[in-house]
Image: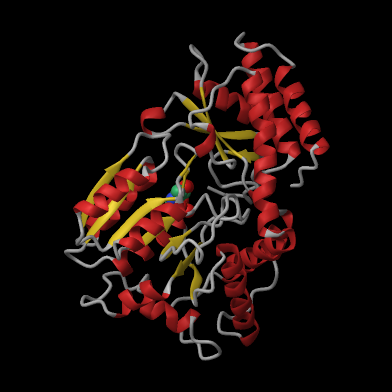
Amino acid sequence: MTASSFLPPQRTLMGPGPSDVNPRVLSAMSRPIIGHLDPVFVGMMEEMKGLLQYAFQTENALTLPVSAPGSAGMETCFVNLVEPGDKVIVCINGVFGTRMKENVERCGGTAVVVEDDWGNPVSPDKVADALKGNPDAKVLAFVHAETSTGARSDVETLCRLAREHDCLTIVDSVTGLAGSPLYVDDWGVDAIYSGTQKCLSCTPGLSPVSFSQRAVDRIQARSHKVQSWFLDLNLVMGYWGGGSKRAYHHTAPINALYALHESLVILQEEGLENSWARHCRHHDALRAGLEAMGLEFLVAEEHRLPQLNSVHVPEGVDEAAVRGELLERYGLEIGAGLGPYAGKVWRIGLMGYGANERNVLTCLSALEAVLADRGVVEPGRAMAAARAAYARMDAAGSTG
Ligand SMILES: Cc1ncc(COP(=O)(O)O)c(C=O)c1O
């Protein structure tokens, strides 16, 4: 077989991630490769650490991008902080809490599960009870922004509860970072991981992480070796934490790191609060359009993530056929439901660079046309509602 160059089609990515990547980021990736121990590269890494600290709102020295996707950031937190026999309270309100439980068990820990229905946030009351009932728990783990449903949990309250019980926290903010307010230091988060392909609008494949001094102390006091060589932070720190004296650990994904650096520079230029506000603004317009079509949200308004909008599929509509048509005719990707919501909801992402008016209007007009063909919505309403929402926000002086 003679293969030729792969030329992907142009898509608008409005699923649960990856999201549309800023062209500046793609262009940064194509810059010349240099050695990963080159002093110029090391200087860029130092700068990147500062940019990540800004994104996470932390002064944690142990803040770096793991050279692998969000799942590796998750594993980095668990393999370093959970030792065999440790009890960990794991909150499950969607797919990613389930994966946290799996991680605890693979580390030889015992998971105490606090369950909430999919679409709901993690319940602080249930967590408080679990902490009281398990005074020997070492870690509380939960997801800030549950991508499988679009529910946002209250990081500040959950971390405060954990601290009251002298418990460390592991927080998944793969979909949260840069899209929703997050203050790692002020809220007392101990270990957090994210991903590059969501609200940072970078290419997939890296996982920013950050660890508090309490977490570092726990890692340094471990009685068992971290079972993963690659993710053992004691070793990774020799490369990322060594200042000008960096030791080889693994070959850094150099051009991917140029991309992340660029996306963080873009975030800094925009300002973190402005990025959060922009996600809300475009969510409000999208919501107006979706509701004008009669589509109902899965998550209650006060717990909704602006960057991940789950709406129920109208009765009698073949949801996969709609997604297929959106992709083929309009080049638009939206996401399917997962778990109990497979076949029942669509997940519409408004993440990072993709959180803009063009994407909102593209999505509404395409979805409205496809649903109008099936006789379940009346054409014209969604676009009018979204435009009216933008006009109202402009009149009220909404930025973003
Ligand atoms: C909340 C959450 N956690 C973890 C992950 C895993 O990240 P990755 O797919 O980059 O490994 C994802 C990916 O969608 C996610 O949404």
Residue drawn at (37%, 73%), measured in percent from left and top? Answer: 214
Query: Would residue 9 be seen by someone viewing this image from the given angle?
Result: no
Q: Which of 168 and 207 is in front in this view?
A: 168
Q: Which x, y percent locates residue 355?
A: 68, 43
Give the quarter of the image for residue 203: bottom right
Q: Which x, y percent locates residue 38?
A: 60, 85
Q: Nearer the viewer, residue 327 or 385?
A: 385
> Is residue 128 positioned above or below 252 on the image?
above
Residue drawn at (44%, 64%), measured in percent from left and top? Answer: 188
> Is residue 87 positioned above or below 241 on the image?
above
Q: Nearer the viewer, residue 4 or 329?
A: 329
> Is residue 263 positioned above or below 400 on the image?
below
Residue extending farthest to the left is 85
The answer to whether residue 365 is left or right of residue 313 is right
Residue extending farthest to the bottom is 245
Q: Which x, y percent locates residue 49?
A: 57, 74
The answer to whether residue 133 is left or right of residue 232 is left
The answer to whether residue 169 is left or right of residue 303 is left
> Is residue 273 positioned above or below 148 on the image?
below
Q: Which x, y percent locates residue 120?
A: 41, 36
Q: Which of 354 and 283 is in front in this view?
A: 283
Query: Would residue 201 be seen by someone viewing this image from the given angle?
Result: yes
